[in-house]
Image: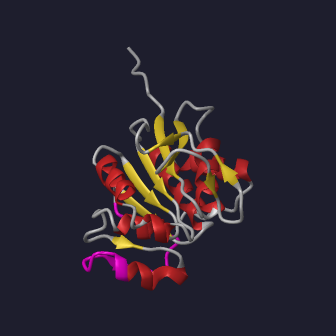
Amino acid sequence: MDQVCLARKVAIVVFNQIEALDFTGPFEVFLTSSGGGKDFQIYTVAPDEGPVTVLGGLSINPAYTIHNCPPPDLIIVPGGPGARTEMNNSALTDWIAQTAATAELVLSVCTGALILAKTGLLEDLNITTHHRALEELKAAAPASAVIIADKRYVDNGKIILSAGVSAGIDMSLYVVGRLLGADRAQLTATLMEYNYNSI
């Protein structure tokens, strides 16, 4: 009897003054690689009810809040100027920490790493962020974490962090490859017409 393979739920955290490509890049990767929703179901999650204003003025309507979100298999925490506010939002950081306990993977893009730094999840890990925020991350992260400044993303097993903005696309393609195979990652990059180097 064939086992039914349920689609992994991918929750992308959004908040005011988020960097657009930090969340839309991973959204596009997981959507394109989802097999029409068979392998991934992607949704946005905000700290509170109501629209979110993206850096530059774009307004989006999150599908859920942290109070009613379906339990995700993957959590993606993007960055942007608003991350410096949300890193001090204990309701959000507590939700990420609690939800990470049952999630398969936790990913950050750019200064989303500052938010992860406040969750208690980065002890003894290799970490990275946007090159202009490395010192901020060093100050916010546990002393046991090691800053990696020369990689597009770093894989710690369950927790994967990427450098700035477009690096989130590379990380997401890498994760697709890890979960569904290198051929799926390359096909996704080809469909996106994205020059992906899986290093």
As drawn, the residue found furthest toward the right would be 193
Q: Is residue 165 magenta?
A: no
Q: Residue 142 is drawn in which quadrant?
A: bottom left
Q: Residue 146 is drawn in which quadrant?
A: bottom left
In the rendered view, tell whether residue 148 sits above or below residue 34: below
Magenta range is 139-156
Residue at (41, 65) in percent of width and height:
115
What's the image's color scheme? secondary structure
Q: Work out whether residue 139 or residue 159 is closer to the camera in this orientation and state it.
A: 139
Q: Work out whether residue 150 or residue 16 is closer to the camera in this orientation and state it.
A: 16
- The answer, for residue 6, to whether it is visible in the render is yes
Q: Position of residue 87 (x, y in %)?
A: 41, 67
Describe residue 134's horizontal placement relative to residue 142 as left or right.
right
Residue at (55, 41) in percent of width and height:
42
Residue at (38, 51) in percent of width and height:
105
Q: Work out whether residue 4 or residue 83 is closer to the camera in this orientation and state it.
A: 83
As drawn, the residue found furthest toward the bottom would be 135
Residue at (55, 30) in percent of width and height:
38
Overall secondary structure of the magenta stretch?
loop
Q: Position of residue 74 (x, y in %)?
A: 43, 46
Quarter in which the N terminus is drawn: top left
Q: Position of residue 196 (x, y in %)?
A: 64, 61
- The answer, for residue 153, to whether it is visible in the render is no
Describe residue 122's horizontal placement relative to residue 52 as left or right.
left
